[in-house]
Image (cartoon, rainbow, N blue to C red):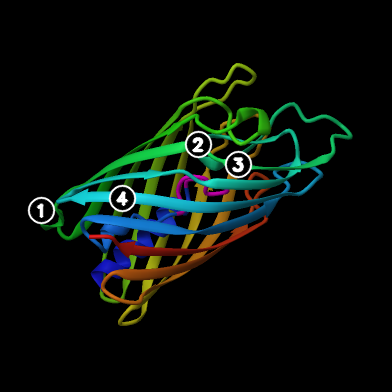
Amino acid sequence: MRRLVLLAVAVAQAAATSAVAQDIKLPPPQTIFPGVSFSSGLDYSAGRYGDRSDTDILVGLTNVTVSEDDFQFSASMPYLNITGPAYVVVGPGGAPVLINPAKGAGSTVRSGWGDLNFSASYTLPSDALDDFEITGTFRTKIATANASKGLSTGATDFAFSLDVSKQFDSWGPFATFAYRVPGEPSFYSFNDAPSFSVGTSVELADNVVAIGSYDFDGSISTSLADAQQLFGSVTWLATDKLSLTAYFENGLSSGAPRLGTGLLISWKVN
């Protein structure tokens, strides 16, 4: 049960930090599988982001994680397919950003590898915290994607987050607080921005956990409103080495995707 809750909370916390999940909707598999683990999946989102035209984003997710005691390290690189206005660019953390919208600009289809992402986390021993689970995480996104296609801003970004959760029988409330420090591309100016998520996990069966959360993601750009959305997921621990997660998002503001959904699979390598 504890392993399932940790995985479910990780999915919700990750969803809170990005509108389209370029580098994070992958649960850190080491929360249930110590050692070297691999995660993969698909994420789809659709929204207007304050514009008059729709932008559809399909993301192929790939993540490798190594854990040792209370430390965990992960690397990921998404594959993106974007259908929408050419001035909608994938910004820090995967959030869409409008760059100098022009009237009459037509829809384009762009695809390619996204930016390379790294993260490092440390979890405080819960025995010393009255069974609270507290994890600090540092993330960086290195600009490896094709900026001319709008797959990246072409700048390196940083983010910091603090996750707090505690288990009460079959449910486990949690909260995540994060702060994003975007890079400075030559063509646009971004602002630092906070984000947070609050929610709970609920045990549905011995090996199934559902979660729900409210997520707020502060905008880094004056061209985009803050993102607010509701998130829900179901995680099934199929075996001691394999888990499946399905999730859904509903946008509450113009800065968030109108809807989003995804499917993730995680398994232990060794």
Q: Residues within 10 Å of mark 4 (few under 14, many from 20)?
A: many
Q: Which mark is residue 128?
A: 1
Judge the density around disc 3: few (<14), some (14-19), many (≥20) Cα neighbours within 10 Å: some
Q: Residue furthest left?
A: 128
Position of residue 262 relative to residue 85, above or below, is below
Side (left or right) of 90 relative to 110: left
- Alpha carbons under labels 4 and 1: distance apart: 26 Å
Residue 90 vs residue 198, the one in the foreground: 90
Query: Label 1 crowding class (10 Å Cα cut-off): few <14, some 14-19, many 20+?
Result: few
Kindly state the secondary structure of the residue where label 4 is placed. Answer: strand
**Residue type at numbered disc 4:** Thr
Q: Secondary structure at mark 2?
A: loop
Of circles 2 and 1, which is in front? 2
Q: The disc labelled 1 sits on which kind of residue?
A: Ala
In the rendered view of the protein, which quadrant contains the C terminus?
Answer: bottom left
C-alpha gap between disc 3 and disc 1? 45 Å
Q: Earlier in the sequence, mark 3 or mark 4?
A: 4
